[in-house]
Amino acid sequence: MNRYIRRASVFCLVLLVALLLNAARVQVFKADDYDRNPANRRNVLARYSQPRGDILVGGRPVTGSRDSGGQLRYERTYAEGPLYAPVTGYASQIYGTSLLENAEDDMLSGTDPRLAPVPLWTDITREQQPGGDVHTTIDAAAQRAAFAGLGAKKGAVAAVEPRTGKILALASTPSYDPNDLAGTGKPVTAAWSRLTSGDAQPMLNRALKQTYPPGSTFKVVTAAAALDHHKAGDLDASTGVPSPYTLPGTSTRLTNEAGGCANASLRHAFEVSCNTVFASLGVAVGLDGMAGTAENFGFNDKDLKVPSPAARSNFDTDMNAAQVALSAIGQYDTTATPLQMAMVAAAVANDGEVRTPYLVDKVTDADGAAVATTRPRTLHRAMSRGTARHLQELMTGVVTRGTGTNAAIDGATVGGKTGTAQHGVHNEGTPYAWFISWAKRDGARDPAVAVAVVVEDAAADRADISGGGSAAPIARAVMQAALR
């Protein structure tokens, strides 16, 4: 009899061990799979069972949470939603998250292990902590100036602090109110349908996610390449480039909107934006040199995150000489985000060093204790210090006596570059007006801000001056706000 009892005991023990092993498999090894299963509503209910952490600008929350009393209890709220939508993105019970709400979701929702007093124990119990707060680098005054400057225009503004890479403004118009996407029900689905249909694309972050032909603002990159590769030296010496200029290997004659471009000096060509001179310089530098310099500024980087991913700015690496010439003046396949062009201006102001742009200054737990802090770091050296000083001189000339006089600010040194990007079939589309710039208060050690502005629907002619007329006043307002 005892023999049968022993066998039954052993069998029960085997079953118990198997049960424990399966429980461990389900709760530990398969937990992530079950968490990600769309049929599992537990995580969704838990996510909205408590208020979400806040996103802050200048120490002030621009988000909040509202108790709806429903199953998905807490809904996101946004103060001045359209103003900060290109920064915060949206958090929706139906449509998920975007931009900072997405990139910092674990911190804001309270699931980041760094928020736990005992992280290992929290990993086992899967306990949710109160949401942490995300402190942005945005300067409220600069953001307001950018948004107000764009107004009803379609376009974008990106502003960075050259010495650190802090993003001071990120504006995109037309914008939208992320409050409309919080919660559930027909009003939310109707808002989503309205916002995602049509040509306006208000949910597109044009400052971070949209690329444009940069037009003549790219001549800053070409000038840097020419100076660093010793294809240009004395800023006031004749370049010997004719006007018009015949593209290599073709019969196509490149012309200028500005006058005095035949045999112009680099200084004059930069101030009035002679296409012929910069196309010729691009050919002289060559494809490898041009591509290398562009990539040192940040072009062709598909991994740039701020922490939201930025669209890849493009400089083609497989072109013939004629295509290199066109790329050198910001045409052909060359495209850039406004953030990328703000980085170009910042590199000039920062003596040739490109700092990694970032939008989150620090994250804190619910008690205000710092969980992580972002420290400035160098992304690339775009050009030598000497070349950067030459470009500072050239860009300052654009504002004092060239096409960018609308950006001048009393009590500050301002450098700029205008641009008009032609697009559409046979260049029949309305040109995009560009202006990139930097500003340094008189007597200050470091430049305060670098800005890029693009206006899609500029009422402009095809002359380079259009960037100075449409985009430069917006940049000026943003720089004034940052200087204050």
Image (cartoon, rainbow, N blue to C red):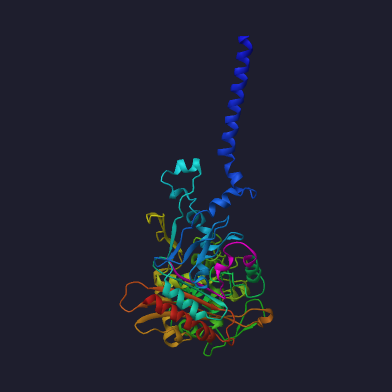
Q: Nearer the viewer, residue 406 or 95?
A: 95
Above/below status of 476 relative to 307:
below
Location of residue 183 (image quadrant): bottom right
For the point 48% across and 50% down, the residue is 112
Which image quarter is the C terminus in? bottom left
For the point 42% across and 72% down, the residue is 140
**Is residue 412 at all visible to an observer of this figure?**
yes
Q: Nearer the viewer, residue 378 or 26?
A: 26
Residues drawn in magenta: 165-188
Above/below status of 221 relative to 374:
below
For the point 32% across and 79% down, the residue is 442
Tell me, yes or no, whether the highlighted magenta stretch contains residue 445.
no
Above/below status of 344 relative to 253:
above
Tell me, yes or no, whether the highlighted magenta stretch contains residue 187.
yes
Q: Is residue 465 left or right of residue 409?
A: right
Q: Nearer the viewer, residue 11 or 293?
A: 11
Residue 116, given in percent of the width and then of the height, sits at: 43, 47
Name, please, the residue furthest toward the bottom: 259
